[in-house]
Image (tube, rainbow, N blue to C red):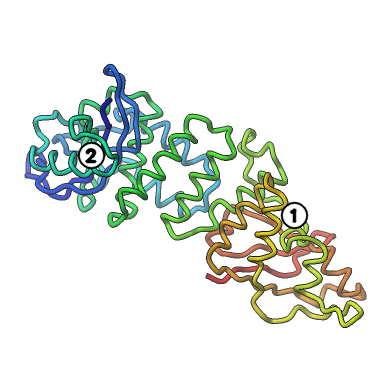
Amino acid sequence: MKILIGVCVLLFSVNIFAAKEVQNGGGGTSQDGSYQTFGSARISVDKDPLGFYAVPGLSLLTDRILRMPLPENVKGELLAAITPSLARNYHQISSDKFDPDARRNLVAIYAKLLNVSSDNVVIFAVTEPKTKKTMLLPEFFRLNEIEQAAILFHEALWLVNPSATYEQIIDIEQAAQAHFQEPASKTHLLRVLYALGVFVHQPMLPLVPAIILQYRPDSILDEDWSPVIIPMDDFFGGFEELDRFLCKKNPKMNCSEPFPYKIDLRDVIRVRAAQNPENLFYLAFSDYLQDVHQINVNIMDNVRGSTPYHEYYHRMFLEVDVQAPKTLSFTLIDHQGRRVGDLYFFN
């Protein structure tokens, strides 16, 4: 069994881009000459860059990223690191153009990381972050299309964050490959979004798709990531919990304008996740609240009219949109569809 590796090359010679120092990468396995990715790989380059359709797996990778329920800023950053351009190039190289010392260094790193013999490590490709060049070795072209897409994604991630760790990249690459292989799996989608959210410092990434999938289960099959409307009660963990946070009982229920303080939903949502182990919304929300992410509610009172506060609050809904991780906010609407405020998170 051999481990298939992706590498990040830091220095090149002028013509053949021979690597002098290597760090970063991903891996996989091969059996009986059939290659399978473990995570991904990194290596050196040829002189003439390859066009978009000359890079196998690139079209599939681009299509998968375009279809993911990601906010525009994250999707744009990933696609910029993936798509060939005047500044971003892919090259095909032969094995003898990869500096032997750099190869040995990389192989040793992966042998230790994967707990295998260095004889079982194979290198796929490398990327030079400063010049944004990715070099594809012959082994890369022996992979199937999904594995190639996973390798290319691995390479692009080093450009998004050159200081990332091997473990981070491998985690995302493996989750992404599982999603590419089974795009209809909700679990695979949410796992790659979770890993990406940690990577790009937007941990809310899986939360909105989880809410959409919970309230509109066919979204992943229909590729429908348009906004959904959910009761504000649900977001607070239920009818009684909403009362507890926005109203006071002393001993009668007394609801007035929402208190201008930050609300901590961690304990409530953790309990709801335990009580509803297949509820994607509560599970993803519980993960998000591992760190302290408090919320605030800003409700306009001028559209309430004569409706009692208690009834007013319980007839509100949240409009959930995939751009929320970028803005950290949701729009509040009433039962007539009027915008009546915002619910937003604090980092």
Q: Which residue is drawn at 66% across and 65% down?
A: 267
Q: Is residue 346 visible?
A: yes
Helix, strand or loop for disc 2: helix
Q: Where is residue 252 in the image (x, y as percent from the top left)?
A: 92, 79
Reading the image, the residue beneath label 1 is 230
Determine whether label 1 and label 2 are within 8 Å by CB.
no
Q: Where is residue 327 in the image (x, y as percent from the top left)?
A: 56, 64
Residue reaching furthest top?
A: 32
Q: In this view, does 2 lie above or below 343?
A: above
Ranked by sequence position, the earlier of labels 1 and 2 is: 2
Q: What residue type is labelled 1?
A: Ile
Q: Which residue is drawn at 24% across and 43% down?
A: 112
* Quarter of the figure that contains the N terminus: top left
| Most foreground residue, 315 or 147 | 147
Is 138 situated left or right of 173 in this image?
Answer: left
Is 160 situated left or right of 271 in this image?
Answer: left
Q: Which amino acid does label 2 sit on?
A: Ala
Other-residue count near label 2 (Cα within 10 Å), few / some / many at <14 / 14–19 / ≥20 = some
Measure the alpha-carbon separation of dots 1 and 2.
49 Å
Tag shown at residue 117? none
Q: Is residue 288 above or below residue 179?
A: below
Reading the image, the residue beneath label 2 is 111
Q: Position of residue 44 (x, y in %)?
A: 17, 39
Helix, strand or loop for disc 1: strand
Q: Residue at x 18, y 42 (%)?
A: 108
Q: Is residue 116 above or below residue 192?
A: above
